[in-house]
Amino acid sequence: MHETKPFRVLIAVDGSRPGRAALRWAYSFLAGIDGPSTAEVFTVWVPTERMGLDGFGLIDDSGYPQEAEALLQELLRDEGSPSNVTPSVGSGRPVESVVLAAFGQDLLVMGTRADGPVRQALVGSMSQAVVGRVACPVAVVPQQFPDPGGLTVVGWDGTRGAIAALRWALTHRAIDKVRVVFVAEPLAPAPDRTTIREDIADVFDDATASCLDLELRYGDPKTELASNGSDVAEIVVGDRAHVDADGSIWGSVTSHVLSTTTLPVIVVPAENAAIPGSVR
């Protein structure tokens, strides 16, 4: 008998309020998964370097792993610890450690330390560096986020990134909760709704395309995708941007949305476009 592979989620935390928000969002996500799932609550212990008598740096591992493990136990005690959740501690540089731990996972969940425009510098340093270097989708969760029962907005332009984003949304959210947003330049001729639905049907199917809530907007895609009403709970975007040498994303719609919205953002790599997904 074929055994269903559990859906694996890695939740990167550091004991801060944003980390706790990421944990709560991840728990809500896990509760909605059809089928088996596992979650790993992961934190990173960063060794300090002290100077030895010979002038060379020595790694000071005092307190490891007790301090990091104590942090996780406190977090799980405060926020809850379902039976499918296990704590895990890594060591080293935070970005590299999270990227390594995310290998083989189906979703990585991270918190971000600020909301709105101030978020840019912070997301740009940690979250964007990770987003640009992992193969799985990444959920970047702000400290305050709305009821997860709201709408999921997906940016659509027919590219592999958009296909990957929509496939993720249709796999993990009910179809009546998915809103597809097509943004046209103000002076450019916009395709009509029928054409857009036909493009979606070519990738998915006619029934899916006809059921989706489709919204046309005019303006800059970077701004429009980040601007949503109170009925929206999250944004899903496909990542097809240039990744810099340090893993950071520059000059992309994804980067702008991450920098400016106050909603959770799920970034789905374009490589996920070919992965089959079931519509709930």
Image: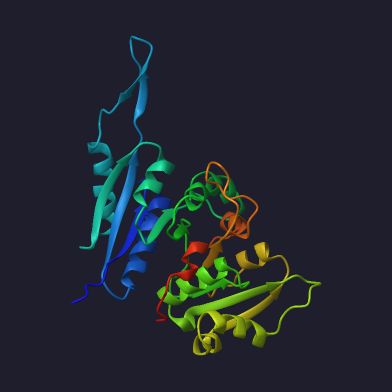
Query: In percent of the image, x 27 and y 67: which residue is there?
Result: 6
Q: Residue furthest left?
A: 1
Indicate the position of residue 163 as horizontal and vertical percent values.
Answer: 54, 72
Indicate the position of residue 4 as horizontal and vertical percent values.
Answer: 25, 72
Q: Is residue 219 left or right of residue 80?
A: right
Relative to 222, residue 251 above or below: above
Q: How many labels were placed on the picture?
A: 0
Query: In percent of the image, x 33 and y 45: which residue is there?
Result: 43
Indicate the position of residue 100 as horizontal and vertical percent values.
Answer: 37, 46
Relative to 271, residue 251 above or below: above
Q: Is residue 82 left or right of residue 175?
A: left
Residue 269 visible here: no
Q: Residue furthest top?
A: 54
Indicate the position of residue 165 as horizontal and vertical percent values.
Answer: 51, 69
Residue 255 visible here: yes
Q: Quadrant of the C terminus?
A: bottom left
Query: In percent of the image, x 33 and y 67: which residue is there?
Result: 30
Q: Quadrant of the N terminus?
A: bottom left
To which quarter of the image does residue 26 belong? bottom left
Relative to 113, residue 211 above or below: below
